Amino acid sequence: MYLVELRPGKEELYRTGDDLALAIRDGGVDARSRIYHRATAKWISITLHPQYKAIVAGQQAEVAGPARKGWGLLQDLTSQEDGSLSVEEANAGGDGLERWKRPLGLGLSSILLVLGVQLASSGPRPPWADQNKTAVVSSANSEIEPEDSRDSNGDEESELVSLASTTVKWPDSRPVAETVTARVTDTPILPRAPRLRRKALRASLVPDSGPAVIKANSVQAVLARYDMASDSALARLVSGMRVARMNRLFSASRLSPGGGVTDTRLRLAGAVNIIGKFRQQQAAIDQAYQDSVGLLAKEHGWTPKELRQWSSRPPRTEAPTLVLVSNALVAGIDSLLGVLGAHAGAYKLRGTAIAFEDPSAGQAYGTLRRSIKEQIEAAVAAGGSTSSGPTTLLLQAIGTSTLPRET
């Protein structure tokens, strides 16, 4: 998550890098903004962030415009698909070059097309293009004896064609005698195939044994069942938070005095109940599987390597620091909603500001708002935005919404 100070006195929390990039492109985050650097615990200029540099460089490249694609007399023909003249060319009636550019380009294209057709027709013709010659069909022994014969009129000369032939051979430009005595060339010899060793051939013919079978009492099977149970508990937590509808927790509609505060407080209480049940279920799963691992290791003689594999598994329970921070955050939000509910109708929301009629109520609200902001930053610093658990879902429910400042 990224904490950005848009301008002095206004801060915004972006959950992912895509949200920050969208804000930079929309102009909400500009060169005057600052971002909180968690490693040094300082505010630095947003212009030092690599994502901001990349987006600004891309925008400058787009402003520069594409390079010129066409040159010469035909460049307007390629740039305008409908073939119409541009507005500048239509208005500039006195410029002869712009006026005759399109007709001149079409004329040159027509001349080049005609020259290409003439060049193709003046080249050498293939043997089969001559209509006066007939196909010479080779017999079984690839020899044909020509015999001059004339038709009934005595005008044209034809060749005898063997009906037992199977191959048609067109005559070439050589004399008829050379064509008749020519023989079919031999088929080119293919290279010899490489030899294969018997062992390599036998190994390639052995069928695949398939995936390895996991024993039911092995450490791999226990880890698989543990992950399935933990994933099931996490899925119930995500489904419960989705039903609670906790998106944009600090939006103006949820803090409005006309029933929005009461509804938000009820939804927060439901989310707290769901989070508590998840933590109890996950603790019970860890305890049950830890006892099972101790029993199976004794009965089946697990090796130290298998025990280390179980102990080095990724933790599925929240860290104690995240538990404390999330509990404090939920309690602070509930207290703030309690202040708003107690003074319903005695405060007004104006954009990112809130005004109380009672000055003491404004002071209490301001103290709670600053405390909630610090707890959110502490949760992000402790890894609550990247872990899979209640703290991550709670930060996602808050999202980029921020509490209005008291005036």
Image (cartoon, rainbow, N blue to C red):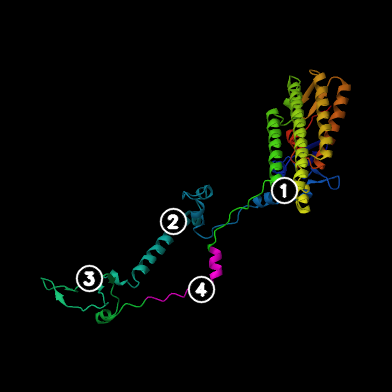
Numbered disc 1: secondary structure: helix
- Residue nearest the observer in this picture, 222 or 401: 222
Q: Amino acid at mark 3?
A: Ala
Report the span colored magenta: 187-204
Specify few, some or many for label 1: CA neighbours under 10 Å numbering under 14, 14-19, or 20 or more. Answer: many
Q: CA distance from mark 1 to mark 3?
A: 79 Å
Numbered disc 2: secondary structure: helix
* Residue under the point 39% across and 66% down: 116
* Residue under the point 53% across and 67% down: 201
Numbered disc 3: secondary structure: loop
Q: Are marks 3 and 4 in contact (CB under 8 Å)?
A: no
Residue 280 on image: x %, y %: 77, 33
The quadrant in which residue 251 appears is top right
Q: CA distance from mark 2 to mark 1?
A: 83 Å
Q: Which residue is mark 4?
A: 195
Please state which of the two labelled residues, at mark 4 or mark 2, is closer to the viewer. Answer: 4
Q: Earlier along the polypeptide chain: callout 2 or callout 1?
A: 2
Q: CA distance from mark 4 to mark 1?
A: 46 Å
Residue 163 on image: x %, y %: 21, 70
Please state which of the two labelled residues, at mark 3 or mark 2, is closer to the viewer. Answer: 3
- Residue nearest the observer in this picture, 398 or 343: 398
Q: Amino acid at mark 4?
A: Arg
Specify few, some or many for label 2: CA neighbours under 10 Å numbering under 14, 14-19, or 20 or more. Answer: few
Q: Earlier along the polypeptide chain: callout 4 or callout 1?
A: 4
Q: Which residue is mark 1?
A: 219
Q: Are marks 3 and 2 in contact (CB under 8 Å)?
A: no
The quadrant in which residue 326 appears is top right
